[in-house]
Amino acid sequence: METSGGIVAGISGRYATALYQLAQDAKATDKVAASLAALTAALAESADLKSLINSPLIDRADAGKAVAATAKAMKLDKLTSNFLGVLAQGRRLAVLPAIIADFGKLSAAARGEVTAHVTSARKLDAKQTSALLAQLKTGLGRDVALDLHVDPEILGGLVVRVGSRMIDSSIATKLNTLGQRLKG
């Protein structure tokens, strides 16, 4: 998978590309993607895991042992487990969230999908999510993966970003625009 198309870049892009290529060679992209999704969920829930990947005080050997134990406890696939060990030895665990995001971009590109980054004021329910997905698929003419985020500061509405295009229908932006117009 080439990274020159601007899909991924930097350290996280190089690691994600290497992992993606290894997963393709092993015909294990779905297993690796599932393991990475489990890691993302664990990082969101576990302060200890977040601390492990971000702490510069944990030496390589201890980090390696900790990620091996974590991978075993989470029943991650062998390729992902080994990859975590490589990250620990290279002191690159802090880049893991970006690597996971870049792996997702590479997977989506291989499937012909685009990712829509959607920010809403509150969590969208299943009906809203499926309606949004259908509308984006129709509008873009291709399969769409949603990356959903919640930001109460937008007050309401949605901010949707696909590539370099952005649609901002948030109430906060509308209020700011109205305020600017009223100022003259």
Image: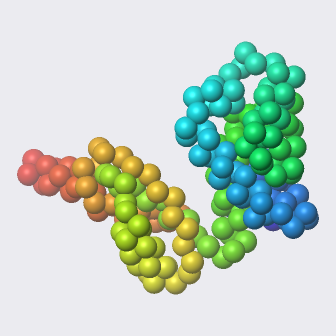
- Residue at horizontal 61 percent and vertical 39 percent from the top: 43
Q: Is residue 183 left or right of residue 51?
A: left
Q: Please, which residue is most extreme toward the right here?
A: 25
Closer to the camera in the image, 157 or 58? 58
The reply, left or right, for residue 101 in relation to residue 135 is right
Percent across and percent down for residue 7 are: 68, 61
The answer to whether 72 appears left or right of 125 in the picture is: right
Q: Quadrant of the N terminus?
A: bottom right
Q: Is residue 103 above or below residue 91?
A: below
Q: Is residue 9 among the parts visible in the rendering? A: no
The colour mode here is rainbow
Residue 83 shown left or right of residue 144 in the figure: right
Q: Position of residue 151 (x, y in %)?
A: 36, 46
Where is residue 109 shown, x and y percent of the image? Answer: 68, 69
The part of the image, by quadrant, that contains residue 142 is bottom right
Q: Residue furthest top?
A: 57
User: Residue 126: x, y in percent?
Assistant: 41, 67
Q: For the point 49% across and 79% down, which residue is it?
A: 137
Answer with the quarter of the image where residue 42 lies: top right
Task: Give the tally of numbered discs.
Answer: 0
The answer to whether residue 43 is above or below residue 37 is above
Residue at figure coordinates x 55%, y 40% from the top left: 44
Residue at 37% x, 63% y is 125
